[in-house]
Image: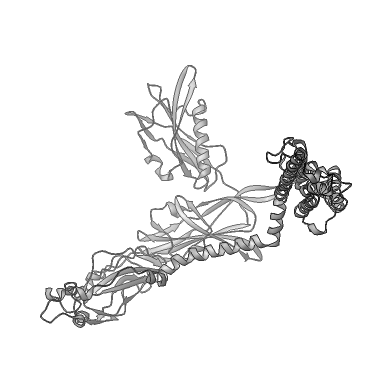
Amino acid sequence: MNHLLRYAFWIAILALLEDGGLSRAAARGSSGVRVYAKVDAETTIYPGDDFVYSIVIEGGAKPTKIDLSPILQFNPRRAGGGTSMQMMVGDRTTVSYSENYAITASKAGKMNLPSVTVEIGGETYKTNPVEVTVSQPGTTDRMQVELSLSEKQCYVGQPLVMTVRWIISVRWDGAAFDVPVFKSDDFDIEDVSDPAAAQAAQQIAIHSVPVTITSDRRLIKGMEAQVISFSKVLIPRRAGHIRLDPVTVSTNMAVGTARTGDFFNPYQIKYSRVSVQSEPAELEVLPLPEAGKPPQFYGLVGRYTISASAGPTQVNVGDPITLTIRIGGSPYLKPVEWPDLTQVPGLAGNFKIPTEKASPVIEKGEKVFTQTIRANNERVSQVPAIPLVYFDPQKGEYVAARTDPIKLEVAPTRVLTNADVEGTASAPVNREVEAVRKGISANYYGPEVLTNQSFSLLSAILHPGYGALWSIPLIGLILSSVARFVGRSSPQSVARKRRRQAAAVAVRQLKKIAKQSKTGRLHLAHDARHPSPISRAGGRHGHSHASGAFGSVPEQLPSAMKAYVADRFDRVAGSLTADDCHQIIAESVGDARTATKYRELIMACEQARYAPLDAHIGADQDAKPMEMIHHMIDLVTGSKPTRSAPPNAQIGPDQVAKAMEMIRLIEKQAGK
């Protein structure tokens, strides 16, 4: 119906814009209101096609009533909601409204749609009649339509199955079905209650009747063909001879190919509109006989089966029993009604039957009814047979099918008194009596029935429920701690931590050395102002005092510098030489100048250590490694090299700044 909605929209637009092409028979009131009818004629209409019939009101309000009785024979259906529009005609605004209906074309020829009456604001208007031409499509032997009935003769009210099969062996597009029986008043039309319908591939509507179609491919007369079919249940309303008119199918059938001139799609399939018709079907409908009609007969015609089951079958008086009744045997189960259990002898008198009933369901081709009944005395021995009366068309007589009786064992139930309920009759109450007599008197006596519900920590720990509550978080904590420890103690984690902390460790060591150098200078300055007798004598002990202050610097400086290179570049400090440090820094950092300075400083320290007379190691040499390390850090972090000395160094601002700058440079280059 989507294409009909689009048609309806464009028809409304064209109808509102078009003036001269419409019939002059359209009604026009004194107030300037114009009402007319129009049919979409953009494409050729074939039998089975739907077209849009529109009623247009110009210059008036929305219609209060539209009398469609003159065209009801064509089965008009609403095609979307009404369409309203405003138009400027000269200096005047005109409001127009369109009401759209879908109509299915029947056989080829002329369809004359008479005038309809429209009421607007208390005034009555009539539309113009519309003539629709339905074209006859071509015919072909590449497809055929079959119409068949499950019975050639039936009775009034007897369901029979109509099946339509469309067989086509070529490519097709846009099929339209015309099934005249769907527009007939001779039948009630219902769905087939058959599990095979679940295999349907598509739901469509033909003349507003929902249809479930199935599609498969078969080999017919040596040719592979597509078979599209659907079935419906027809129930005759009247007796006599009824002719079912042929079913028509029209479609666009592929008849060849044509060149398109497109490089990517050089050929295009050509289609031609064709149609085929089935043979008509004849049906003889007989009236139901009045002789021998049972009072329980309510209109079932056909062949039906009935069965019943109940459970439980061993009960006490008043216990619920679920009674299940299944009725099947016919492809059409909709007219099957609830069995009237109150009219079954032996059932209404011996059982309590509620008036409430559950809705029946369809299961495996049977209609299932479920009801709860209760035996009202212990003499009940069975659920009696339940009858189903129907007319059997094969026998030509009324038949009463019955279920098999269901055996029951019903035990008597003692009637309880108030004393039984309360449990206060004569006998003393103790635990044994309480276990046997189950009265509410068990609530009357106190201490021995109390339960100790005090909280115990040990019981809570040992209880499985509490154990799960406290053990799950504990286990999670343990697992996370183990994972964290394993992660931190792995060789890769240790190596990453060593590289990450290399610069900080080196700077701390150099500051410590700088502090020692500062202490040494203070001692030398004091000795210069207050020379001791030994120093004034220029003895060897004076020289030894100076070297005691600085004697550890030549040894600690190269060790700290080598340790930094080893930690930062995953080496062993004890095996490194000055040349090794030069090579590692040059290769890893790519700064040959810094590497050379680093090597020269280490060699100067080692020279002072092993040849102290020729070496001059003091605060300046102590600050240079710090300058290199901070220079490497500066390159790693991207910060601007600083020229200020650390506040705690006090070895000399320039020397400390240079050391920090060199370390930052190496760090930045190594981070790349």
Q: How many marks?
A: 0
Q: Indicate the position of residue 30 as horizontal and vertical percent values.
A: 37, 21
Q: Is residue 500 left or right of residue 128?
A: right
Q: Indicate the position of residue 159 as horizontal and vertical percent values.
A: 39, 64
Q: Is residue 59 left or right of residue 505?
A: left
Q: Is residue 298 visible?
A: yes
Q: Indicate the position of residue 65 as horizontal and vertical percent values.
A: 35, 35
Q: Is residue 25 visible?
A: no
Task: Give the camera-side residue of 218 and 376.
Answer: 376
Q: Is residue 49 left or right of residue 340?
A: right
Q: Is residue 39 left or right of residue 295?
A: right
Q: Quadrant of residue 572?
A: bottom right
Look at the image and name its color scheme.
one colour
Task: Give the camera-side residue of 620 and 497.
Answer: 620
Task: Give the camera-side residue of 646 and 585.
Answer: 646
* Picture layout, residue 363 above or below residue 27: below
Looking at this rendering, what residue extends furthest in the left direction?
426
Q: Indicate the position of residue 86 as horizontal and vertical percent values.
A: 46, 26
Looking at this rendering, what residue extends furthest in the top direction?
91
- The structure residue drawn at horizontal position 47% and vertical position 56%, both measured from the top left corner, is 211
- The structure residue drawn at horizontal position 50% and vertical position 30%, both measured from the top left corner, is 15
